[in-house]
Amino acid sequence: MITSGPLIWHRFETLIDASEALAEAVAVRLRAVIATRGSALLAVPGGTTPARFLAALGAHDLAWDKVTLLPTDERFVSADDPASNERMIRAAFAPLGQAFAQLGGGRARFLSFHRAAGDLDAAAGAVSAELAGLPALDILVSGMGADGHVASLFPGEPAAAMTGRGLHAVAAHPAGLPARISLSPARLTGAAWASLLVSGKEKAEVLTTAQALPGAYPVGLLLGRPQGLDVYWAKA
């Protein structure tokens, strides 16, 4: 039986404070990984919550050309669609931009989930195949929905139960929402260090409930990691 690792709460008054503290923690870990292995693999969430975190992380002086960034999930839309996670990440994270390179900084690499337009399963398969050639995530930063979903693994959806070690990305069809590509449960749980960035009383309560009933909530995948989980929670 696998024993869950430590669950460490970092509590803040505001999302800005939580985001900046998380950015500092990730920067410290990226430096250590790059110093040890020469490169690092970092997965980050989409949506609106992580924009401040991404901006703060991008302001750190790091060897960004040694870092590969990828989303935890992506809606099956064009890369320039307003709903695209890639679009938000590229806008918020300076080391991905051309202007960053023009200022003398080495640009980070971005692993896009936009493949095989019009065929979700083929696109997910292409992303999974590319990830199969890469090491485990060094750092995972995840968000969490009020229903306990992480990445695009939603409660009751088949994608959340696709736990095979050979799967690295999966097609997701959440009810009433656009189709998506998500990192697989194995990819998420296999990260060397993982964190959640969340805010509000409701999400704190969801996490507490998920600790007692991890199988009912996809976030239970992260709560059950033997490597542990760091939660960066903001009161508002």
Image: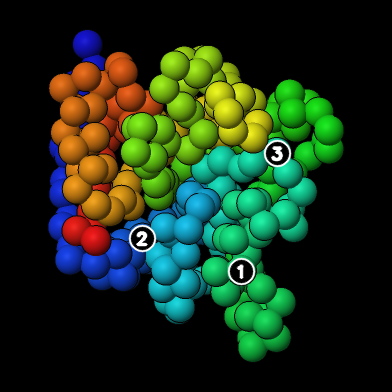
* Amino acid at the residue labelled 1: Ala
Q: Which residue shows up at 37% across the image and 26% down it?
A: 218
Q: Residue 75: image x %, image y %?
A: 64, 41
Q: Nearer the viewer, residue 130 or 221?
A: 221
Q: Which mark is residue 76?
A: 3
Q: Visible in this render: residue 81?
A: yes
Badge 3: few (under 14), some or many (20 or more) residues near its Cα, within 10 Å? many
Q: Nearer the viewer, mark 1 or mark 2?
A: 1
Residue drawn where x is 47% and y is 42% of the image: 137
- First along the sequence among labels 1 and 2: 2
| Mark 3: secondary structure | loop
- Residue sitting at the far top: 1
Amino acid type indicated by mark 3: Phe
User: Residue tagged by mark 1?
Assistant: 91
Task: Give the left or right position of residue 78, taking residue 106 as reference.
Answer: right
Instruction: Report x, y in % for residue 158.
Output: 53, 15
Decide if residue 24 is in sight here.
no
Left/right placement of residue 197 relative to residue 62 reads left
The location of residue 90, given as percent across then percent down, is 63, 64
Above or below residue 168? Residue 201 is below
